[in-house]
Image: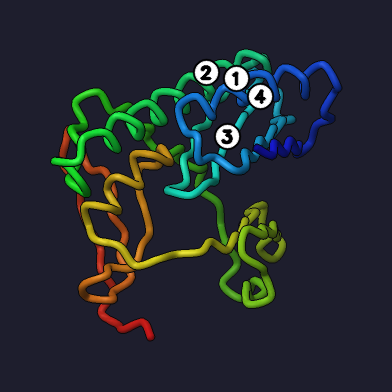
Amino acid sequence: MDITVVARNAEIHPNFREYVEEKVSKITQFYPRAQRVDVELTHERNPRQADTAERIELTVYGKGPVIRAEAKSADRYAAVDIAAGKLYERLRRLRDRAKDHRRHLDVPDGADLPVELPEVAPEVEVLEEATLRSAGDLKVGEAREEQLGDSPVIVRQKVHEAEPMTLSEALYQMELVGHPFFLFIDSETKQPCVIYHRHGWTYGVLRLNTTVS
């Protein structure tokens, strides 16, 4: 299993890399089909966010769904521990689900599902004439950050591969990546859709009235 460790606004010290690799190497115990783990460390330079200055994002790729977890802390080692704990729990549920053939592709019981609410960005004035470059030149898995005109807004674009799936599959995928929303193509209607968490154990689905060839 390949392990890639990258950093934004920070340096990766050998001791930290060794700690991360030791942590994520246990993934194969829960997910033998894992082929690659991407670890991204982001350091927030704003002193007002010192308590959550270190952000760790773990993404597992393999012969199956993509599984993701993230965490923030004042200490990067602590952030790794928290993110790894979330990831192991999601992998455990994935393994248990695979063993239960009677519930194949069924909506999972979310009784113990930790829902992470999206962070609310501060209001900013965005220039109407500001434009962004097209993402047509980005490769799958490639990301690009770009400032929106003269405003303080930074937009990050990333291209993902997407296979059509059912609503139940999309809900399950959303659980595995730990997002409060999930973008997918409905395999029945071919519509681009977003499923999102509303409140409690209720979810909403937004659909675009178009067709995908």
Pair 2/4: label in front = 2
Which numbered marker is on residue 93?
A: none
> Disc 4 residue type?
Ala
Please tell me in which quadrant of the rendered image residue 107 appears: top left
Q: Amino acid at mark 1?
A: Ala
Mark 2 lies on a secondary structure that is helix
> Which residue occupies the foreground of this view, 29 or 174?
29
- The residue labelled by disc 1 is 79
Alpha-carbon span between mark 2 and mark 1: 5 Å
> Badge 3 is on which residue?
58
- Residue at disc 1, secondary structure: helix
Please report contact status of discs 3 and 4: CB closer than 8 Å, yes or no: no
Judge left or right: residue 195 versus residue 29: left
Quarter where residue 23 is shown: top right
Please report whichever mark, 3 or 2, sits nearer to the chain's N-terminal start: 3
Which residue was labeled with disc 2? 82
SS under mark 4: loop
